[in-house]
Image (cartoon, rainbow, N blue to C red):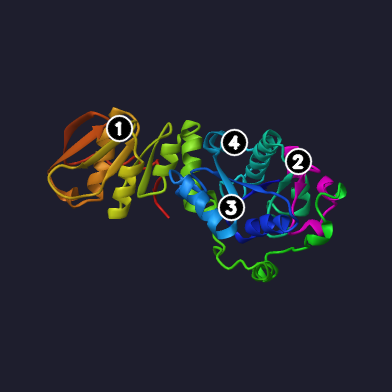
Amino acid sequence: MVALFSRGLDSILAVKVIQQQGLRVRAVKFITPFFGWEIKGREQVYCEEIKSLYDIDLTIVDLSREYLKLLADPPNGYGKNFNPCVDCKILMLTRAREMAHEWGAAGLITGEVIGQRPFSQRRDTLHRIENLSETKGLLLRPLCAKLLPPSRLEESGLVDREGLFAFSGRGRKPQMALAAELGISDYPTPAGGCLLTDPGFGLRVRTLYESGGIPSVTAINLLKHGRFTSLGNGEFFIVGRHRNDNQELLRVADDSCYILHLAEMPGPVTVLSGQAEQLETAAAGLCRHSRAKNLENVKINWRRGKKSGRLVLAAPRPPADPGKQQQTAP
């Protein structure tokens, strides 16, 4: 069996319930810049941790390319913010179905519970997701299975329906009780999960899509930090607010980005994702948020990959375009 795994309590329980029936489960955790990205680069360590804590075999799959393309025009629309929850689940289940076929797995399982999420876990939405991901009959939701028609896995006798559950709604007491019964105590508290559900961050991402098409992974990760100013055409600059922002911006920026900083005094890191013609505008933004904002002439160093240079910004400095969006990271 192949399980969609988030490390939330529900996904842990779904796997353990099926393991209790003597079936082998391979869990899959999908990651994108919007969720799960904190384990990028340390996948093996993370998988070993999950195995040690829960005795679950895990595979990590980066869905960034497919997800960024999907986000431009999700067929089932967005949620309250810029979150394409229904199409996100369809994408993950479709990919999991393909992996199950490659691995010779009998079916798929998820930790979904009817009514837990108002948009993507309604009964009718669950059925639509099954149909569009072509997983009808293959997909089993062990925590709410008794509230749904039997899957082929149950009808064939591979899975004992009596060992499944009828959880529903947003409460967690039944899941916590089951976790205690199964001896599971180390699990995370509920969290927001996907960054696209955050109104401020979702607006930043929407701005890039509406002005310049599909952004890069690097661009999305830059949006998580500092003060954001859109320059149109998918171009923007970010000014760090504090040391942590500065460190993260330097870590995330790649050779396609311009990195700017004050030449003669400490100040914020600024990253420009755009063209050389925008350097002066980004430099002015840097000055406005530094101790150099009232100086007559400010020297600013920049670098992009192996190239570097200096520009001198004299007062009065060009303001940011008032028609462009300037936002502070959540």
* Label 2 packing within 10 angstroms: few (<14), some (14-19), many (20+): some
User: What whole-number distance in Å separates the C-alpha atoms at marks 1 and 4?
Assistant: 29 Å
Kindly indicate whether the residue at mark 4 contacts the one at mark 1 (C-beta within 8 angstroms). no
* Label 3 packing within 10 angstroms: few (<14), some (14-19), many (20+): some
Could you say whether the residue bearing mark 3 is in a helix, strand or loop? loop
Q: Is residue 150 located in the magenta-colored stretch of the structure?
A: yes
User: What whole-number distance in Å separates the C-alpha atoms at marks 3 and 4?
Assistant: 20 Å
The residue under label 2 is which amino acid type? Thr
The residue depicted at 28 percent of the width and 43 percent of the height is: 270
| Residue 242 visible to an observer of this rendering | no
Residue highlighted by disc 4: 70
Could you say whether the residue bearing mark 4 is in a helix, strand or loop? helix
In primary-sequence order, the first of circles 1 and 4 is: 4
Q: How far across and how far down the image is residue 89, in percent?
A: 65, 45
Question: Start and end of the magenta stretch?
Answer: 128-154
User: What whole-number distance in Å separates the C-alpha atoms at marks 3 and 1?
Assistant: 40 Å
Q: Which mark is residue 278?
A: 1
Q: Quadrant of residue 55?
A: bottom right
Residue highlighted by disc 2: 135
User: What whole-number distance in Å separates the C-alpha atoms at marks 2 and 3?
Assistant: 19 Å
Foreground disc of the pair 1, 2: 2
Q: How far across and how far down the image is residue 64, in percent?
A: 52, 38
Foreground disc of the pair 1, 4: 4
The residue under label 1 is which amino acid type? Gln
Residue highlighted by disc 3: 6
In primary-sequence order, the first of circles 1 and 2 is: 2
The residue under label 3 is which amino acid type? Ser
Split into 4 quadrants, where in the image is the C terminus? Answer: bottom left
Foreground disc of the pair 3, 1: 3
| Residue 148 visible to an observer of this rendering | yes
